[in-house]
Image (tube, coloured by chain):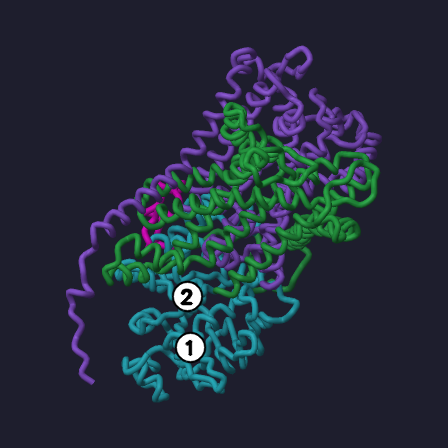
Amino acid sequence: MSFSITTTEPQETVFSANDVKVYYGKFLALKGISIDIFKNSVTAFIGPSGCGKSTLLRCFNRLNDLIENFHLEGKIVYHHQNLYDPQVDPVEVRRRIGMVFQKPNPFPKSIYDNVAFGARINGYKGDMDELVEKSLRSAALWDEVKDKLKESGLALSGGQQQRLCIARAIAVQPDAILMDEPCSALDPISTLRVEELIHQLKERYSIIIVTHNMQQASRVADMTAFFNVEPTDKGGRMGYLVEYDRTEVIFQTPKQQATQEYVSGRFG
Amino acid sequence: MNTPAPNPAKIIRPPSQWDKSLDRGFIWLTRFFALAIAGILLWIAVQVTIQAAPAIQSSGLGFIFESTWDPVKDQYGVLPQIYGTMVSALIALILAVPIGVGTALLLSENFLPLPIRTVMVFLVELLAAIPSVVYGLWGIFVLIPILKEVGGWLHSQLGWIPFFNTPLAGPGMLPAGVVLAIMILPIITAISRDSLISLPPELRQASLGLGATRWETIFQVLIPAAISGIVGAVMLALGRAMGETMAVTMLIGNANNINISILAPANTIASLLASQFAEASGLQISSLMYAALILFLLTLLVNVLAELIVQKVKRI
Amino acid sequence: MPESIPETANSTLTSGNLHRSLSPRTLFNEVMTALAFLCGALALIPLLAVLSYVAIQGFSSLNFSVFTELPPPPMSQGGGFGNAIAGTLIMVGIAAAIAVPVGVLAAIYLTEFSDPHTVRWIRFATNVLSGVPSIIAGVFAYGIVVLTFVGLKWGSYSPIAGGVALAVLMLPIIVRTTDESLQLVPSEMRQAAVGLGATKFQTVWGVVLPAALPAIVTGTTLAVARASGETAPLIFTALFSPFWPQIWPPQQFIAPTASLAVLVYNFAIVPFKNQQQLAWAASLILVLMVLLTSIISRWAIRQRS
């Protein structure tokens, strides 16, 4: 399956998934996904729950490797290298592709140490104070925490914690950032701040965001992919990609009936 | 079918006086027994102190600093036994903490498929179920012959180090320490593993997502987050090692003096009690009870600290 | 505008390849993994060594007569430890008769009737009690039972004292397992019973306790199995005897009594081959008892969940 994207100019791709199939044990959870993710843009994955959008997201930094019976077929190419080549070290992959999780998950360490963690394990030799400050500024958190860097990251509010997690992710200078429903645990005001942040971050990073909030997708994303789920013969559920295009196309003139129904709120 | 509705008054009756007093009596009975558990701890302390009273009067605090144990002259002091209790427990911790925590990590991470991990967890639990006296018997006939080889090598190669300046003739501090290590290992593994697997999975994911390797995650995120549980486990193990009796009695050699060499025979408070009680009389019994009181207070202190640490973990 | 971030040490991000390399980090990771496996092996070796040695030595000295005969004098053939088995059963029975009712009722108070503050303290005391060295339980029972009997001129060492000492050791295990299994009974069950007009006693006795019974039985069995291997407390309370325990008349019952665990201890430290062999056989029986109860209780818990 391929998609003719209504695009104006050719863009550089960061990720290119090619006929990706995800299995849990014997069960096919995602079937034949092919999708190109573009550089310095925000791509949103939307769809009803259980459609596998988070699963696909976690394929891009091989975080699914942690799941015991996970198995992937197909290719995900990242800058001309297949992420699932047996030669590839998942640690190297995750080092370059940052991740922000659904629930803010700061380490039970100080704010400073949370941000410095990634740089330290990667043997960063430069000025750590400077790196921490710049990362926190990039995450629009510096002014709120500059006087309490030694306090625990867990003492912050939910929205601040999530921005701390973003600061922590960008401190290792990733190439791309994956966000798994980053605002679902936040109040509307914190959500707005994180969305503003995403807008700024795309100038430097390629971002994929999974969201079940369609307004959010339309607000932050340049590209949007709509996933759907269908029951399998064996009683399982299997996700697939329905449509992928520029966000305004998906929300205003989608080509597929299912997309139209989903974005207009008729199901899901 | 027209059965008349049963008369509600016959079914529904308020609880009788009997029901009410039974209820009250039952609650009081359970309360009594629950408080009795706390009471037993106190009772043990009082009881042991009463029996130790004659020795406390005759030796006073000097008992702790005196190193003669001579029933013939009726002179008693437990410094060597306190030393032996501490050193044997320390040897056990030095051996069991790294192995126990390492095993806890092996069984809390996904190094192995889940079914194998489950079996291993069960096997480690079994290690704690084997009676102390069986470890002692095994120690006499299997462990000591093996350790004699090890001890002989240590003495000949490293004899210049004071810890190894005697040969291992048979029973001694080292065999006792090794068997204690085996016996406390399951405590360390089980409680450390509990605190490791109760960490939120998000922590592990966050660290791996930043490009940390598995062991960077373990050392820099997981162990710091679970540290109080691990420390609590080590404290509980220490308490157990200090109070362990039979296996130690059978393997330590029961020598009532202080020898810096861990290859020499020694004694602990618990094994002093076990080995001397049957033939003791008069002030000697009371002195043994004094020693028991010291052991009780030492283990109580360690256990209370351990429980406080572990409870703190649970409340977070 | 986001701030520019200083370049990190290895910022050859997009150009560098992702392949595994033998960097110090990777090497450290591999070495530590190997060490963890080594720890696991070191933890299991003693278990296998003890079990296999006890099995080999034990089975070779096990025969029918060990269950029926009395311990032999040194250097003679045959003999057994029927009296020790009987003594262990009697003392564990006495211990269970004391510890099970006390422990279960105390646990009922903790889960059903108590306030959170008291509960915390009593659970704390229970845990501390379970850390009390077993030899201290023996000293305690010696003080409250043996010395009392001496004072009353009834005798001195007895299976009753042994039972009391073992009860002190069993009590915290029974409280804890009962406490845990009562907490697992869904509160809807209690509400349903109360909603039908049951009193607290009726609710607990008729609904909650039966629901938790299998778990309580499992926990008690484990506690009994553990107690039967305890040696130190019996040295202070029941001592040992080469004769059969006498149940009647009561004066005869209050007398030193043999037990499997003390038999192992006594015969392990003698130089006589025949007695050592009996020590192995007795060890095998103790280990089998603990092993089987552990496996069965594990299996029972599996079945229920």
Q: What residue is disc 1 on? A: A51
Residue B84 seen anywhere in this rendered image of the structure: no
Q: What residue type is disc 2 on?
A: Asp
Q: CA distance from mark 2 to mark 1?
A: 14 Å
Answer above or below: position of C34 versus A127. below
Residue B59 seen anywhere in this rendered image of the structure: yes
Q: Colour of chain C?
A: green
Q: Position of residue B71 (x, y in %)?
A: 67, 15
Magenta stretch encompasses residue A237: no
Q: Is residue C225 left or right of residue B148?
A: left
Q: Do circles 2 and 1 both sit on a common chain? A: yes
Disc nearest the viewer among 2 and 1 = 1
* Quadrant of the snapshot with the N terminus of chain B: bottom left
Q: Is residue A55 left or right of residue A184?
A: right
At 51% from the left and 82% from the top, the residue drawn is A32
Q: What residue type is disc 1 on?
A: Cys
Q: Position of residue C235 (x, y in %)?
A: 62, 32
Q: Position of residue C148 (x, y in %)?
A: 50, 26
At 76% from the left and 32% from the top, the residue drawn is B171
Q: Secondary structure at mark 1?
A: loop
Q: Chain of mark 2?
A: A
